[in-house]
Amino acid sequence: MQLTLAAGEFLLYLRTERGATEATLRSYRSDLRLFTGWMDTEYPGVELEHIRLVHGRRFLYDSPHNMGRKPATVARRVATLRSFARFCWEQDYIPTHPFKAIKTPKKTERSPVYLSEVDARRLLTAPENLQLPAWRRDRVTLALMLLLGLRRSEVLSALWEHVDFGAKTLLLPTTKGRRPRVLPLPEALADWMWEYLQERLPLRTPYLLSNPVGDAHLTKGHLMTRMRQYLGAAGLEGRGITPHRLRHTMATLLLEQGVDLFTLQELLGHKDLSTTKVYAHVNLEQKRRGVLRHPLVQ
């Protein structure tokens, strides 16, 4: 069986059976395209059933595609090749799993980029201060990321039917492999959402955030354009602040207030606690201050 044909079947399986996100599919598609292209060059004519461990190791650690790459990039490609090989093995396309023994390179720990409480407050008040058209929508948009830690995709796909103003909760249903979450709405955010809803009535789209006309959901491009305007107004331009870094900000600020990692894991929707633990070390200075208050240190 040809490698490219098997790769196509694997991507179709990820989309239809596993519910992989478009971002995940792009990454897998890119990695597999590099691998199959490299195989065609280095080992022309080798069929899928003749793939061996040496092929995977040479591609990952000797090919120009991966030399000098960040450990995180190589680790993702290791995961791609392993998943692809496991799929082929489970489909009986190959007799063994050739890439099972490939080790994942150790990732470099990086501190997440986030805003201070003062900067976050300044950004959150920017929509009301600027009073641009649909500023109430923009205030809700920023609050969903800064107060609840929603991913950009979750912000754009949120629906009014999942908002419970009585219980003050927002439901994020199961989507593309992610667990459902019921998030509590802070009083201020619930009020801002209610004000924005009154401005939107009668609703012409079920999406929580709409385009300026109100008949379709807010687009990624429009969200980013407005966000850049508010970052500029708050004096935060040029600092690489993205929607995901607003999520980092929410997590870090809650951790600094003493919220435990297990609660933070539930709020963020992480499957694995190790993903949440990346925020733990940003609290080092706070821990240091606590240790220095120990009576035996005085």
Image (cartoon, rainbow, N blue to C red):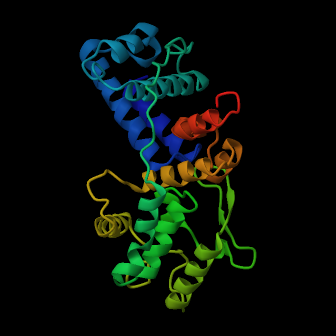
Q: Is residue 41 above or below residue 34?
A: above
Residue farthest to the top? 54
Q: Is residue 158 above or below residue 281?
A: below
104 sits left or right of 181 in the view: left
Residue 274: horizontal and vertical position, in percent?
61, 33
Could you say which quadrant of the image residue 35 lies in?
top left
Residue 3: horizontal and vertical position, in percent?
39, 24
288 sits left or right of 223 in the view: right
- What residue sits 43% from the left and 74% below the top? 138
- What residue sits 43% from the left and 11% below the top? 50
Residue farthest to the right? 167
Residue 249: horizontal and vertical position, in percent?
49, 53
Could you say which quadrant of the image residue 77 lies in?
top left
- What residue sits 59% from the left and 83% below the top? 194
Q: Nearer the viewer, residue 273 or 188?
A: 188
- What residue sits 26% from the left and 54% below the top? 238
Residue 98: horizontal and vertical position, in percent?
51, 13
* Residue 45 makes an appearance in the image: yes
